[in-house]
Image: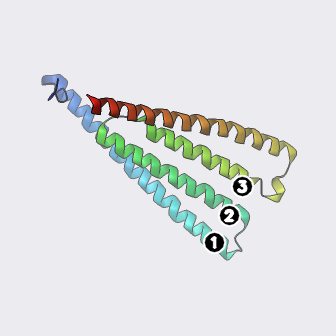
Amino acid sequence: MEGTGPVVEKGMRGAVARAFSLTEDVVYAGMGVLLAFSAAALLVSGALELWTATMQGAPLKAVIALLDRTLLVLMLVELLYTVRVSFRQHALLPEPFLIVGLIAATRRILVVTAEFSLKDAAQAARFRDGMLEIGLLTVMVVALVASLLMLRSRGRSQNEMAAAS
């Protein structure tokens, strides 16, 4: 079956398929523009808040907020990459979404941990809740990493089988 390309439908089905494909491209482009704008806006506002906090003596809460915002920008950029891949390949790939989930879980772990360094947040109930949240997030990180490793090993084995044939 070498040399067979994508199925090109003719007539009404082909026109509808092309219209849906164009609509999908427009939606992906719009999402990309919105994600890029959001990431840039968060980056600029984070820089302004850092400047303000530095001028006020860089309180710890401002640094924690900056960490949270910076990791949120990283998530948006990774989502932008996912949109770009989906736009190019017209397929949703699981790997970029797993990476976004990994960044989100890591972001939350870092923020919860940093919040514990604040002196007024050292209540026993809040500490217990925070430890439970960190434990659940850690399990989620392990599951996401295992999923990524399985996807990558499956991709390598498929490439090796294709090279052998």
Quadrant including the C terminus = top left
Q: Nearer the viewer, residue 141 or 101?
A: 141
Looking at this rendering, what residue extends furthest in the bottom direction? Answer: 55
Q: Name the residue under label 1.
A: 52
Residue 132 in the image, given as x and y percentages of width and height: 75, 38
89 over 57 or under it: above or below: above
Numbered disc 1: secondary structure: helix
Q: Which label's residue is closer to the chain start, 2 or 1? A: 1
Cα distance in 3D space between marks 1 and 3: 20 Å
Q: Mark 3 points at which residue?
A: 114
Cα distance in 3D space between marks 2 and 3: 11 Å
Q: Which label's residue is closer to the chain start, 1 or 3? A: 1
Total numbered badges shown on the rendered structure: 3
Numbered disc 3: secondary structure: helix
Q: Mark 2 points at which residue?
A: 62
Q: Who's the residue at 47% across and 54% down the image?
A: 38
Residue 84 is tagged as none
Residue 137 in the image, given as x and y percentages of width and height: 66, 39
- Which of the two discs, 1 and 3, sits closer to the camera? 3
Q: Which label's residue is closer to the chain start, 2 or 3? A: 2
Residue 44 in the image, given as x and y percentages of width and height: 51, 65
Question: Mark 1 and mark 2 in contact (Cβ < 8 Å)?
Answer: yes
Q: Which amino acid does label 1 sit on?
A: Thr
Q: Who's the residue at 52% across and 55% down the image?
A: 73
Judge the density around disc 3: few (<14), some (14-19), many (≥20) Cα neighbours within 10 Å: some
Residue 158 in the image, given as x and y percentages of width and height: 35, 30
108 left or right, relative to 101: right
Q: Who's the residue at 57% across and 69% down the image?
A: 48
Q: Which amino acid does label 3 sit on?
A: Ala
Question: Mark 3 and mark 1 in contact (Cβ < 8 Å)?
Answer: no
Numbered disc 2: secondary structure: helix
